[in-house]
Image (tube, coloured by chain):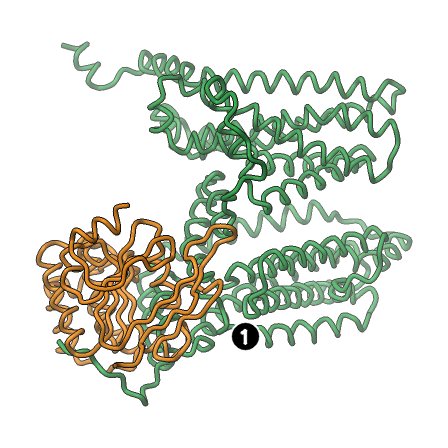
Chain colours: A orange, B green
Amino acid sequence: MPSPMLVSDGATKSYGDLVALAPLDLKIRKGELVALIGHNGSGKSTFLKLTAGTLELSDGTIEIDGEPAGSSPARAATSFIPDDPVLYDDLSVREHLEYIAALHGVDATAEDLDDVIDRMGLLHRADDLPARFSRGLRQRTSLAIGVVRPFDLLLVDEPFVGLDASGKATLLELLDQFHDEGRTVVVATHDAEFVERVSRCIALRDGEVIHDGTATSKDVLRLVGA
Amino acid sequence: MAVRTADPDADLEAALADFRKARRRKRVADIHWIDALYQAYLTALIGGAAVLIGAGFVGDGFLTPDQLHRVAQNGPDWIGVVAATVIAVGLRSGSRGGPIALEHAEVRHVLLAPVDRTTAMRGPAVRQLRFLLFVATITGGVAGLLAAHRFPEADIAWAACGALFALTTMALGYGVALLTSGLRVPSWIASLLGLVLVSWAFADGANVIEGSPTVALGHIALWPLQFNVLGLIAIVVAVGVLLWGLTLIGNVSVEAAERRSTLVGQLRFAATLQDIRTVIVLRRQLAMELPRVRPWLRSRARGIRRFPVWSRGVQGLLRWPAARVARLVLLGAVAGLAARGAWSGTSPLIVVAGLALYIAALDAVESLSQEVDHPTRRNAVPIEAGAIELRHLPVAVVSMLGVCVVAFVAGVVVGPSFEAAEIAAACVVPAALGAVAGATVSVVAGPASASSGGDTWSLMPPEVAGMRLVYRNAWPPAMAIIGIVPILAARTAARHGASAPLTALAAGGAVLLLFVIVCGWVRQREQIHMWWRKQMDAAMPSSREREVADA
């Protein structure tokens, strides 16, 4: 059995007396493609942000391949694609990718970058400023930034929101490809189509795992709706 | 498209430095020389005005030997208060992810990359520090030069020591901010430390307690008058703290840095637009000042059918976070002490008291502010906007009465007497009403701008529009200051042998009248605006109406 890639041991996040994530115990093995579902406020995004290191734990631990979340090796291994694309105002799509690749020690050629940009359907806009793009195009740029760098664990928060059909199809293909290559992929989503494709669906409710296994779209409705 | 692999020998920090350099070059190239010239012109204009005002404040004549002796004795203590304030600001800033406000994208992409965070943060920190030290040196130097007009020693010595004091204080304040951030000092501890430091410095200045550490910094500014070796120690400590802070810079909290990066830009923009409400809301977000999940008291929704707006206000009040309650208590105490100072003869302190209550009242009118923030929600209710807004005021008045009771206690405790208690009691209600009136006008009228108020005002000459802008900004705090005026009236009456409490009560009647007028304005504002618009339309028909009339 593959060793665990992501281990959450009582991970908790609270803001004063407001609990955003109750103690969560979770183990995700290397190479798994996981859908993380739950109703609004169940703690999905908080968990992903804690794992990526943009939020700090109030209690408990999260380890990525044996390293604490937020540490340098964990940051090198984890690519986080948030639901709110954060982009530089003065960099084009191509410049964004050059910058991010360089920050992760990737010596990417122009062809390599064009390959990623083309895959996201942005080649005709490669030299435009993405900060001025529509929501969907900014989301595509954010996805390109997330995959241009090396990673062992990919965290994606609500990726299908704002994407059109072709964008969604490309993303689903990419996620399958990363899974086939042995990367660990965790996607927080409400998208029933995606949930049906994965072998493991984890449902959260008030910080507790209420379902762990395969799920159908009916299960999604049941788990997320109530 | 395959996932790339990282080169283990890649110099990530060098790549980061190269990209930052390239971006800076690009940004500098994008600045038009006219814009740069305009910025320089504005800076020179504001700087010149500040120097002129400062020169007027300092005056000219040489100090007498007795005055010089007093400056040498007490000067370092009071200059230490300035230093303590700068350090307190550093403590607060550091506990909230400061002092650096990185670009949001830098937090997300650079701080989450496997780049050494100390190296990544050092560049922005050094640039910010360089700028702050430059501003501090100029300000301190000019202040020293102005002070030199009243002292016998050479101008250059005062200017140099003034600059050195400001430089050291800023370096220490910045170092403390870096340390607070690097050591992850919780916000409440940082605030408490800052409060203790400033209070200690004040108490030392008033000769209540001795030994405030910031006096050492004060000695630097007065070296031309009297050399004290404590100043040298302060310089060594400031350099040490700054260097220590710089070594811990990589330990910044990403969560705090991200919150700061998203809010600081908006905060500056809102402050530029004089949008006080937005500044308050963003400042609360920056400080993570969230309403309590559980209210202080469980209140049944009694009377909610008959008085829904009142009940809503009380429910909001009961969810105030402890930090807000503490801030209002502190502001109340400041107002009380300042009012006591005004009673004792320092009349300008009523401005301090009025402003403290005004700031407190901006929190007290929270439920009204939220109503104004969401006009669509308010307009969906089949009641006139003015009527709803008016019903929010009682809760604000009740909460401000609480703040003014704190002020009453602070003012009386300093020098307890029956007369002091009588006068303070007579001033509680007017102070609360004046502050609520000011905050209400500020919130309901919204941010002042040259174009707000419609076409009529935009057609006015700049001088008139500018005066209106000044009036819109100054009037709300002025009303809060008017609420404190009964203290001055009572003082004048006492000096002329009349009854001070009765005079304060009579002056309070005028404040009550002002409050009633503000209530009337809130209630009838829409009708007044409609009437005014009709008059303006009649005076200046639109082009379409002119066409119809011509036809």
How many dots with numbers? 1
* Element at label 1: loop
Asked whether the viewer can see residue A170, the reply is yes
> Quick check: A14 left or right of B412?
left
Decide which of B316, B449 is in the foreground and name it.
B316
In the image, what residue occupies the spot 74% across and 26% down? Answer: B427
The quarter of the displayed image where residue B505 is located: top right
In the image, what residue occupies the spot 30% across and 78% down? Answer: A104
Give residue B455's position: percent from left, percent from top. Answer: 34, 26
In the image, what residue occupies the spot 36% across and 21% down? Answer: B381
The quarter of the displayed image where residue B152 is located: bottom right
The quarter of the displayed image where residue A155 is located: bottom left
> Quick check: B306 left or right of B51?
left
Decide which of A158, B396 is in the foreground and name it.
A158
Asked whether the viewer can see residue A92, the reply is no
Chain hosting mark 1: B
> Quick check: B302 left or right of A141?
right
Quadrant for the C terminus of chain B, please. top left
B283 above or below A204? above
Tag 1: amino acid: Leu
Disc 1: which residue = B248
B132 above or below B330? below
B487 above or below A21? above
Give residue A152's position: percent from left, percent from top. Answer: 26, 77
Give residue B251's position: percent from left, percent from top. Answer: 50, 72
Decide which of A32, B292 is in the foreground and name it.
A32
Quadrant for the N terminus of chain B, please. bottom left
Decide which of B52, B162 is in the foreground and name it.
B162
